[in-house]
Image: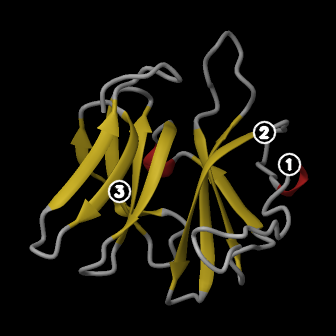
């Protein structure tokens, strides 16, 4: 935490550890990366989403799931809720978006390098809704969405080049 963006920054502890993640029928060491947090006004909980995988074998992720966890405080500790494939679809790079105009939350993610899928989040932000994927876009990564006051949505992304630079 920090009193301003300039700091000074203070470490407040570990949010979620390897031993906190329990997925029935699977076992870690886990790859837990790209964390995103939203505050849910209805449940009064902070909800964490992250890419959940197992260490790469032959250079590719195979588990391709998300993990969710909740906490009363932004610094945690977070309690692991589930590891799953939203809408039954393998998920990789991801982001969350909370619409400032209507308060709806969304998951935006790379769906197995086939396309980018956008799904509405459930009221508790712990899953996607039964509507499933509501939009499909060309495959990309590093998605960042925003919406202007006039209602126009924008999605900024990068190409699929892993750690290699590319034009945004």
3 or 1: mark nearer the eye: 1
Which residue sits furthest left?
150
Name the residue that disc number 2 marks: 30
For the N terminus, give its image quadrant: bottom right
Q: Position of residue 5 (x, y in %)?
A: 57, 70
* Mark 3 Cα shell of 10 Å, populated few (<14), some (14-19), many (≥20): many
Query: Of the numbered discs in the image, which one, if any, rests on residue 119?
Result: 3
- Figure check: 94 above or below 16: above
Q: In the structure shown, which secondary structural element does the residue marked by tag 3 occupy?
A: strand
Q: Which residue is mark 1?
A: 18
Residue under the point 66% across and 80% down:
3
162 horizontally vs 49: left or right: left
Which secondary structure lies at badge 1? Answer: helix
Dots 1, 2 in contact, CB < 8 A = yes
Disc nearer the start of the sequence (3/1): 1
Q: Earlier in the sequence, mark 3 or mark 2?
A: 2
Tell me: residue 92, above or below residue 77.
above
**Distance between the Cα atoms at labels 3 and 1?**
27 Å
Residue at the image position 82 percent from the left and 70 percent from the top: 12
Decide which of tag 1 and tag 2 comes sooner along the chain: 1
Is residue 136 positioned above or below 43 on the image? Answer: above
């Amino acid at each position: 935490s920090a009193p301003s963006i300039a700091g000074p920054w203070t470490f407040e502890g570990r949010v979620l550890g390897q031993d906190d993640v329990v997925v029935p029928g699977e076992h870690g060491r886990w790859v837990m990366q790209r964390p995103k947090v939203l505050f849910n006004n209805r449940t009064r909980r902070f909800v964490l989403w992250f890419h959940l995988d197992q260490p790469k074998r032959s250079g590719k992720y195979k588990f391709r799931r998300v993990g969710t966890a909740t906490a009363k405080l932004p610094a945690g500790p977070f309690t692991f809720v589930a590891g799953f494939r939203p809408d039954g679809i393998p998920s990789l790079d991801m982001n969350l978006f909370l619409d400032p105009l209507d308060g709806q939350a969304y998951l935006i993610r790379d769906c197995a390098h086939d396309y980018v899928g956008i799904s509405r989040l459930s009221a508790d932000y712990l899953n996607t809704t039964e509507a499933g994927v509501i939009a499909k876009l060309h495959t990309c990564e590093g998605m960042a969405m925003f919406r202007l006051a006039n209602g126009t949505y924008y999605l900024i992304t990068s190409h699929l080049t892993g750690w290699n630079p590319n034009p945004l």
